[in-house]
Image: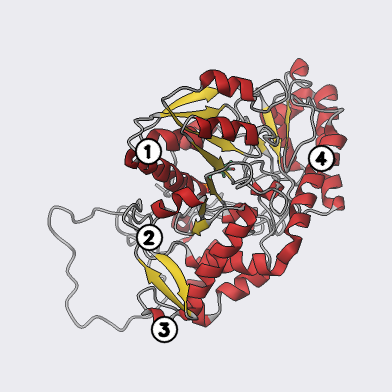
Amino acid sequence: MTHPDGNATIPADPDSPGIGAGGLVLDEPLLWERGRYGRSAVDLPPSGVPHRPLTGPRAGDGPDWPDLSELEVVRHYTRLSTWNFGVDTGMYPLGSCTMKYNPKINETVAALAGFAAAHPLLPDDACQGALAVIYETEKLLAAVSGLAAVSLQPAAGAHGELCGMLMIATYHRHHNTGKTVVLIPDTAHGTNPATAAMCGFTEVKVPVGPDGRMEPETVRRLLDDSVAGIMVTNPNTLGIFESHLPEISRMIHDAGGLVYADGANLNAVMGRVDMGKMGVDVLHFNLHKSMSTPHGGGGPGSGPVAVAESLVPYLPGPRIVHEDGRYRRVDGSALSIGRLHPFYGQFGIFLRAFAYLLSVGNRLRDVSGLAVLNANYLRARLREAYDLPFDTDCMHEVVFTDAKQRGSKVTTLDIAKRLIDLGYHPPTIYFPLVVGGALMIEPTETECKEELDGFVEAMLAIAREAESDPDSLHRAPVLTKVGRLDETLAARKPKLTGD
Ligand SMILES: *Cc1c(COP(=O)(O)O)cnc(C)c1O
């Protein structure tokens, strides 16, 4: 911070309300506004050399950092953290994201010093426990998927897709098939077509049928010699189970193609559905969704892939093998797509997923059962008030639209913003793209009935307000520090400093 007699300091604002302005919901000035020249967190001894200002072409470049005490900095960031909303604060029904509770036992396991302090370059003999965790987690995930082998390397769902589709591309190159087309239903997650394109494939869209499912007839029409495979999100982004997948898989295999399943929605079917028996050749998991590892704030995520026997040689290396009671790392096979991540992937996340899988045990089917029950409960209670574009039993999430409110000029965005005033994080909005004005709600299995009822009451109150006072909804939210934002401007011209 520049000395008050210098030229660049920011003056204290006498009109700034200061802390305590809103009861214990504290206002928070920028650090630049709080800072006072000469304040610091540490007392350094007086300098023994003469003071010389920096000179040269870059002198004076860079931010004029504020001067603050340690306590001011700690309070600033602690207060900001209380403005945050997360699964530990309240229900977070963000469809497609599976924002379920992360049990704290997972954190305890991940923090054990023998794991947390292990160096990834330790020789195998010195990290048998860590290698065992990787090996056993792979085995458990293989059992959940019904597939032959798993690699934990990919660091996110989309990274798992990249891994899976690279394996499919390498498989076709190795077999000289010349196939270049990947079929992708219009209910697939948006990352699917992006991944296919990154791996050099051309996407052909499969329009879904009237009940939101892919139909074998449609796939048959699109199948020809150029089809390298299909990417299916199952359950799909409408929260509907692709019940024709076994037949579709057979058709794809008969045509020499492979089946990729996006398993990010495994939450709905784990413990119940054998993806191997459905004809899936590659599947990715989202540990940060299905297996209750932390999610949000940019990660770290983890997107392991499971493969059928035919693709095992293509898995990324290194792999862990278990022989004569010892765990050992070995390089990938000669056909391997290579390495996708330094070392083994997000090891701290594997520990959390491993702890979760062991603590849930063979009751995994209860997890998916409750996830589906909760979503269907919301569907049943909200179907009078909100339009349901695909009126069929849903899986772990349910998609409504704003069609019933559009007559009074109330949109999905208005509904989402008012939910914030009522204490609920909004669901995913305007996705999936196959329905206009989508409200995609995923309660997850970790919410109890009272919490679901509270959310339902909030949604019903908004539907009533849309009829009685639609204009007021356009102004929501009103109880937040900032109201309706210009989201385009915020994305295009973010203001990140106090200048
Ligand atoms: C979340 C999700 C992804 C992407 O996962 P990331 O970890 O965010 O990369 C892919 N497909 C589906 C169906 C998803 O829900």
Q: Does the residue labelled 3 lie within 8 Å of ligand 1?
A: no
Circle 3: element type: helix
Mark toward the start of the polypeptide (1 vs 2): 1
Mark toward the start of the polypeptide (2 vs 4): 2
| Residue at mark 3 | 126
Of tags 3 and 1, which is closer to the observer?
Answer: 1
Instruction: Answer with the quarter of the image where residue 117 lies.
Output: bottom left
| Residue at mark 1 | 172
Three-letter code, disc 1:
His
The label on residue 141 is none
In front here: 160 or 141? 141
Of tags 1 and 2, which is closer to the observer?
Answer: 1
Circle 1: element type: helix
Three-letter code, disc 2:
Gly
Circle 4: element type: helix
| Coordinates of residue 407 in the picture (x, y in percent) | 77, 15
Within 10 angstroms of label 4, few (less than 14), some, or many (20 or more) residues?
Answer: many
| Residue at mark 2 | 317
| Coordinates of residue 27 in the picture (x, y in percent) | 61, 54
User: Quadrant where the N terminus lies?
Assistant: bottom left
Circle 2: element type: loop
Three-letter code, disc 3:
Ala
Residue 491 lies, with reference to residue 154, above or below; the image says: above
Decide if residue 430 is on the left or right side of residue 469.
Answer: left
Residue positioned most to the top: 407
